[in-house]
Amino acid sequence: MFWSRSFITTLKEAPEAAESISHKLMLRSGMVRMLISGVYSYLPLGYRVLARIENIVRQEMNKTGAQELLLPSLQSIELWQKTGRDELMGETMIRFQDRRGRKLCLGPTHEEVITELAAAYVKSWRDLPFTLYQIQTKFRDELRPRFGVVRSCEFIMKDAYSFDRDFEGLNQIYEKMRQAYEAIFKRCGLGFVSIKADSGVIGGDLSHEFLVPAESGEDVVYRCKICGMVMGAHEAAINECPHCHKDMEKLNALEVGHIFKLGDKYSKSLGVKFLDEAGHQQIVQMGCYGIGVSRLIAAVIEQNHDGNGIIWPKEVAPFDVLIVPVNVSDKLIWDEAVRLHDELGRQGLEVLLDDRDERAGVKFKDADLTGIPWRITVGSRWTKEGKLEFKNRRTGTVTEAAGGDPAAYLDLVRG
Amino acid sequence: MFWSRSFITTLKEAPEAAESISHKLMLRSGMVRMLISGVYSYLPLGYRVLARIENIVRQEMNKTGAQELLLPSLQSIELWQKTGRDELMGETMIRFQDRRGRKLCLGPTHEEVITELAAAYVKSWRDLPFTLYQIQTKFRDELRPRFGVVRSCEFIMKDAYSFDRDFEGLNQIYEKMRQAYEAIFKRCGLGFVSIKADSGVIGGDLSHEFLVPAESGEDVVYRCKICGMVMGAHEAAINECPHCHKDMEKLNALEVGHIFKLGDKYSKSLGVKFLDEAGHQQIVQMGCYGIGVSRLIAAVIEQNHDGNGIIWPKEVAPFDVLIVPVNVSDKLIWDEAVRLHDELGRQGLEVLLDDRDERAGVKFKDADLTGIPWRITVGSRWTKEGKLEFKNRRTGTVTEAAGGDPAAYLDLVRG
């Protein structure tokens, strides 16, 4: 991909309204653009990161045996009345009437729809267990959208729902999901904590939140300065570590995932029943498991940046390698840049070539801002000595390698 | 994937309300489920087909150099007023006011949003040309939803938008897109025609529709019985082939794609201007290119089925191979079925194993209904002679191969 055709548009300064570092860097690097307050377009650079994160989530969900489907955004208010959540959702849920007079809403979450679906499918113990998930756009009428994609009116979630015959089965899948969540956040390059949490409007018997310590986070966790134990704000009321009996420090944190043991909260009101081996009717036990997929992008940036810009972890970077020819009108430099671009592309890497007729300084600044893991400079060292410079965005380390010897640098950039 | 864990739920009869063959077969094979009239959930089997079609569309779009992004569904009515399409869209566009009093709509199409985006980005001739696309959910307040996913209130579209400095550039990308569309429809196993069309509410100077002859189609095309030439309903008013001067036959057809030379219709009203080499301000020339992605599933089924069910073309099939052990309690049979499942999976094929404790006849019926290209039967021929039966869903041909010799059948099922 050539920069000039890539629709990447960087800004020297972030718009004043941007409050958090992730919001500023997403705007400055041209990842997103605000359409109206709380509503964002993902530009090609931002979409690449989104797609990579979706892919990680999909892979880890599939590993648990969960199956992907796609549920509608348009839902009838009537369905929400059956579980009593119509009122509970209040004004956060976007509602309207269509021209046939149907009272509809845009799904802010999908417990009702999936439970209604399961009720039609589940007949016997043989139909259980199963877990379904989707990666889908949700809508909320946020009164105060903030921090770009962190608290917005339209966002992407992964929501999974498990159906089991008993609590033992629910406990098993809950634990599997907890492990899948840890794998997902680790692959995204995130430091995180999980704590017991309030189940809020979702409800159920038990829930865990996954929180990413981040300056602009709106949640709070407490960490013991001695043993490092992390607790939620309910639990740590006394502000003292229950282990060490020492002060705990207060950290802002961003919620990126939440898993719930719903039990029979939805299956009872929407009638998901099955006949067991003895022919007795039983109620299905459910769990639900959410990840804020678009919000993950912000969380990754909050934890992976420096004064010059974003530092993408390998697995979520929009490109693996950025090639910077310092002078595009020097034929020796240009030819080598294009050769590298094509060769690394053939090797399965995502490569961006900065073909703009700009000063090297401008290109280097944009390289740091957009945070692609490796920058390869093709400059005077190439024309004079046949050497390329490989700069690691995270460590700042520069390694030299001969241009003619792919074996010498392929392992480096794949690393 | 084992059938018992796959959430595939087949029906002997389609619900009475289903009018078209594709709608009937999608319901009977458990691909979709109606939530409310005009609104469908894609169950795992249906979602697999949707994902494969999206993948084909994505690959062919990327080949043209178009870049993927993601635009919001939530849009302000104000933006639509600028192009005068607020009124033109009428009641088809879903509108509501949020709690802050903003007048919003759900995007039925995205010319306004993408043009506003381009206006902020394009400054000089150097920024052109580029093409952007998304695969995204659209919303329409359909007065009379029909034929399942064919005419629904919530559906998935691929919409691409090109930006060029002049008509020559627009003509080039228009031709590239036309070719990409032909590649997409061919890979989906579709017979199709493209005809000059009315540009409707999208507008512009010229447009072509891509139509798939299908019994339940709501469009009409005329085909010459002699030379096979196909024409649209404006053009063929005299009902006589302009070549052969003979009668033309009338065929129902389903619109699956529509491409438009918009010219400056949107770029003028939303101000997408650039400075040319001489420093003169010019208006950008646009094109837009739509494919009804979810509707494509129906189109494929309309053209690929028989009395027993769906016949999936290879590239869009939900699974490549279905393994049917005729008796799951026979250890010899079961072990070979699982071995095959694992081996073919390792070879990169998508494999479904019908592990249900059902009669072979029930399984064979479901195999035909769900339309997976290859059915491998593990039965008495296996236990007695070490032979497996490979049945091709389209041709009905049965080929035998020794179970111990993967080389003998891998080419067959990959074919």
Image (cartoon, coloured by chain):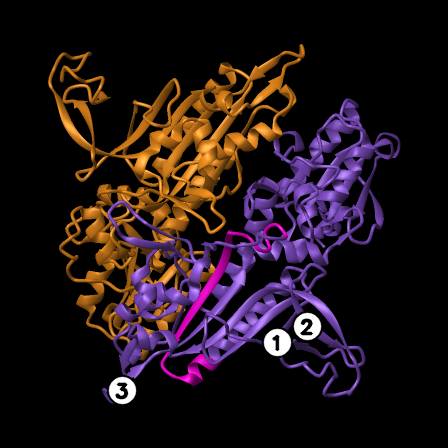
Chain colours: A orange, B purple
Badge 1 marks a residue whose secondary structure is: strand
Whether pointer 1 and pointer 2 mark residues with C-beta atoms closer than 8 Å, the reply is yes
Mark 2 or mark 3: name the one nearer the start of the chain: 2
The image quadrant that residue B227 belongs to is: bottom right
Q: Which residue is mark 1?
A: B195
Q: Which residue is mark 3?
A: B277
Range of the magenta residues? B147-171
Mark 1 or mark 2: name the one nearer the start of the chain: 1
Residue B161 percent location from the top left of the image: 42, 69
In the image, residue B264 sits, relative to residue A45, either above or below, namely below
Badge 3 marks a residue whose secondary structure is: loop
Q: CA distance from mark 3 to mark 1?
A: 37 Å
Same chain, labels 3 and 1: yes
Nearer the observer: mark 3 or 1; the answer is 1
Task: Report whether B361 appears left or right of A324.
Answer: right
- The chain letter for the residue carrying disc 2 is B
Nearer the observer: mark 1 or 2; the answer is 2
Residue extending farthest to the left is A247
Q: Which residue is mark 2?
A: B221
- The chain letter for the residue carrying disc 3 is B
Q: CA distance from mark 2 to mark 3?
A: 46 Å
The residue sitting at 66% across, 43% down in the picture is B27
